[in-house]
Amino acid sequence: MSTIVEIEKLALDLPEEERATLAMNLLESLPPILADEDGGVGEALRRDAQMDADPSQVISLAELDSLIQGRRK
């Protein structure tokens, strides 16, 4: 068995709180890959303009929740 598989099995056997702490520590150990100089403001403005240009692409929070719940089943 490879080391990563062994580590994953051990990690998945941890209680939820310990898994969350481990996940947080692992994520914080990675370099930021999506860091924007403007803190994401430019991306937010681009997405806002896209929604204004084509409102048919916009879904409500309730619709998003429904889609997410559907994927979990």
Image (cartoon, rainbow, N blue to C red):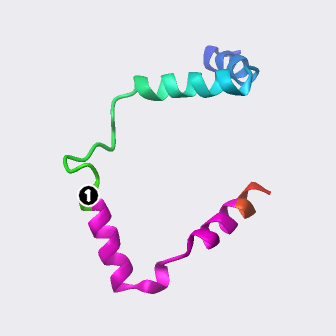
Q: Is 69 placed above or below 35 here?
A: below
Q: Quadrant of residue 35?
A: top left
- Identity of the residue furthest to the left in this view: 37
Q: Nearer the viewer, residue 18 or 34?
A: 18
The crowd level at tag 1 (other Cα within 10 Å; few <14, some 14-19, many 20+) is few
Question: Can you give x and y, in whole percent of width and height, for residue 65 in the image?
Answer: 65, 64
Residue in the picture at 34% in, 82% down: 52
In the image, taking residue 23 as reference, residue 70 lies left or right, namely right
Task: Give the image location of residue 47, x and y in percent.
Answer: 34, 69
Residue type highlighted by circle 1: Val
Q: Quadrant of the C terminus?
A: bottom right
Q: Is the residue 61 above or below the residue 55 in the image?
A: above
**Residue drawn at point x = 74 percent, y = 64 percent:** 70
**Is 19 positioned to the left or the right of 33 in the image?**
right
Residue drawn at x 33%, y 35% as measured from the top left: 32
* Secondary structure beneath label 1: helix
- Quarter holding the N terminus is top right
Residue 67 on the magenta span: yes
Q: Residue at x 76, y 21 (%)?
A: 13
The residue at which mark 1 appears reads as: 41
**Is 6 in the magenta?**
no
- Residue 69, x across and y down, in percent: 72, 60
Magenta stretch in the rendered image: 43-68
Question: Vertically, is 68 above or below 36?
Answer: below
Magenta span: predominant SS is helix
Residue 7, image x and y in percent?
A: 65, 16
Above or below, comparing residue 5 to residue 40 in the picture: above
